[in-house]
Image: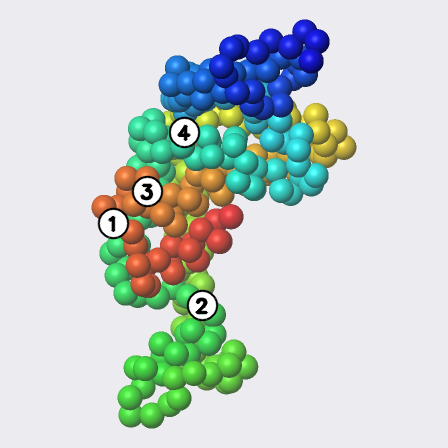
Amino acid sequence: MPGAIVESGAAAVGPVRDPYVVIPADIMFSPQRTALYANMVSMLVRNPYYLTRIEIVELEVDRTMSIDTVMRNDGPSVHMLSAYLKKHCCLEYLRIAVGPTIETMVALGSTSLDPELASVYQDWARSQTAMRLPLVASAVEAAGYTEVQNLSRRRQRHLVHLATHCLHDVINAQHHIPAGLLAICASTMRATKRKFPDTDLAKAYSLVGGIFFLRFVNAALTSPNQYGLLDSAPGGTMKTNLKLLARLMQ
């Protein structure tokens, strides 16, 4: 091939941007190159300023066909964002914003907050030993019991109460949000308005806020052990309660 650059004794790999240049395999997969990539990813995780400067967030948005699916996949920017959100500066914010809610959930113990009628009926039926009720009922059948309806409403009110207080804590802790996360949100906002120019401002802000909750606040609510808020993964009723709360928050 005229003009090709190939080192003696090395196998060609790749396609590369210049079709007349072949990168030797011993260079492509060298320890030095691997270390370089490792350092680059480490820099992106430590300081998201670099993440925004190389426009990986913009590229992620540009590849998205619908505004409702921005940053909702498993693309590289999402993985880097998830890694950054587990750094100390982000964990400190979560301790202030989400920590009190996690403590409340721990205190609830095995008390269920699931307001779904069939689930409420099952819990209620277990407590009515003298009545010998079946433990499984459809939502329509469960709705026939006034006690079940009242308990469902109480659970719903309790969930809304917890979500309101959690949202209050998240807003009050806004001055503790790491600058890097704000930079990523700003970058996402710019890319979204460029990709979807007809989108109104309220929708764009809602999108960025949705990402903030989905990838950060709610991720910490449903997996508090991964964000230093619990020593071990929640299980049983607490796990269900946290998922219900996160769903309501989202």
**Mark number, residue 232:** 1
Mark positioned earlier in the residue sequence (1 or 4): 4
In percent of the image, x 39 and y 15: which residue is there?
A: 32
Whether label 1 touches label 2, CB < 8 Å: no
In percent of the image, x 30 and y 37: which residue is there?
A: 95
Mark positioned earlier in the residue sequence (3 or 2): 2
Look at label 1 and name its amino acid. Ser
Look at label 2 and name its amino acid. Pro
Quadrant of image for the N terminus: top right
Q: How many C-alpha atoms fall within 10 Å of the one at disc 3: few (<14), some, or many (≥20)? A: some
Asked where in the image residue 172 lies, by quadrant, the reply is: top left
CA–CA distance in space, label 2 to label 4: 35 Å
x, y percent for residue 249: 48, 49
x, y percent for residue 53: 54, 16
The residue pinned by badge 3 equals: 226
In percent of the image, x 62 and y 42: which residue is there?
A: 69
Q: Is residue 152 visible?
A: yes
Mark toward the viewer: 3 or 2:
3
Q: How many C-alpha atoms fall within 10 Å of the one at disc 1: few (<14), some, or many (≥20)? A: few
CA–CA distance in space, label 1 to label 2: 26 Å
The residue pinned by badge 4 equals: 84
CA–CA distance in space, label 3 to label 2: 27 Å
The local secondary structure at tag 4 comes to helix
Whether label 4 touches label 3, CB < 8 Å: no
CA–CA distance in space, label 1 to label 4: 21 Å
Instruction: Give the vertical position of 4 relative to 117 (above or below).
Output: above
The local secondary structure at tag 2 comes to loop
